[in-house]
Each structure stands twice: as C-alpha cells, then as structure tokens.
Image (spheres, rainbow, N blue to C red):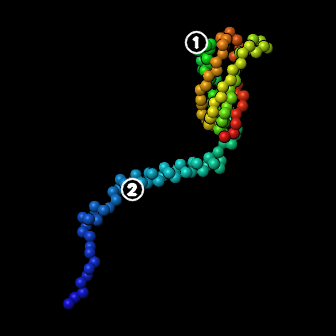
Amino acid sequence: MAPVNDVRREPDNQKERNAIPTSEWIVGGIGCVLVAAVVGFLVQEALFGNSQPPDIKLSVSSVIQTGNGYLIEITAENQGGKTAEGVVLGGELRSGAETVEQSHTTIEYLPPRSKKRAGLFFTRNPRDYELRVRPLGYEDP
C-alpha cells in the first residue's frame, strides 16, 4: 500500500480570493509615504526649525462704538519662530505728549506664523486721539 499524502492543496480560486487587491497595496503605499513625510518634517523642525523669539506685529482692524464706549479690534501676528504664551497687548490714546487713556488685554497662546484677534476697550473715542498699540510682553510656554 502506498503512503497517503495528507498535504492538502488549496484550489487556485481560493488563492485568488485570499490575494490582496492591488488597490489596497496602492493605498497602503500612499499611507506609508505620508507618515514618513510627516515624521521627516517634524524631525527637521525639531533639529533645524526657526529658533527666533516671538516677533509680534499688531494691526488695528476696526474701531466700533459700543454701549460702554469704543472697541478697538486688533490682529496680532507672531512672525517669529517660537510660540508666545500670555501675550499682553497694550493700547493708549494720546493727546500730544499726554496719555489720555490706556487699555490692555492678553492673548493666551500665539504659535509661530499665526494670527489671533483681540480687542481693547476705551471710554473715549479713539478717532479723536492718537492711538498707539504695541505688545507689552509674553511668557515662554
């Protein structure tokens, strides 16, 4: 009696059903490339990123009359390379050398290359005075 070969062979159609479709290989490859690109970018930023301190630029967007006085809407832009936390913005109304009124506000978090809007309230009309706005300080996160 001949030995019985107990090795079972899969039919060819079963192999075809278990094969990974080409579209899945393509999507998987694209995913790997994207993950590698993000990791590469993060490593590059960590090693060679802009290490310049925050550079806050302020611009007045509008002056709005409110029930309690006037609101100066300000746009703050961090043009530096590091994040600024607790950014204090100050504004003053001046008549010649005399400061007539002051106001300040704080922006909690201002990442590099980002913009945030804030507001300063005044009781007097800023259009009647010289308006000066500037960043007063920040903290390192």
Residue hosting label 1: 67
Residue 108 coordinates in the image, percent (x, y): 63, 33
Q: Is mark 2 on a helix, strand or loop?
A: helix
Tally the numbered discs.
2
- In the drawing, does residue 133 fall left or right of residue 96? left
Q: Which residue lies furthest to the front in this view?
A: 68
Identify which residue, 18 or 21, lies in the foreground.
Answer: 18
- Furthest-top residue in this view: 128
User: Which quadrant is the C terminus positioned in?
Assistant: top right
Q: In this view, does 67 lie above or below 5?
A: above
Give the residue drawn at x 24%, y 64%: 13
Contact (Cβ within 8 Å) of mark 1 with mark 2:
no
- For this view, does 24 lie left or right of residue 60? left
Residue 140: tell me if it is visible: yes
Callout 1 amino acid: Gly
What amino acid type is highlighted by mark number 2?
Trp
Position of residue 37 relative to residue 133, above or below, is below
**Nearer the N terminus, badge 1 or badge 2?**
2
Regarding mark 1 in the picture, which secondary structure is present there? Answer: loop
> Residue lying furthest right in this view?
97
Note whether 117 is above or below 129 in the view shown: below
Q: Which of marks 1 and 2 is in front?
A: 1
The N terminus - image quarter: bottom left
Report if residue 57 is visible in the image.
Answer: no
Give me the disc on residue 17: none
Residue beneath disc 2: 25
Q: Position of residue 20 (x, y in %)?
A: 34, 59
User: Quick check: 133 above or below 83?
Assistant: above
Q: Which residue shows up at 25% across the image and 67% down it? A: 12
Q: Distance between the residues labelled 1 and 2?
A: 63 Å
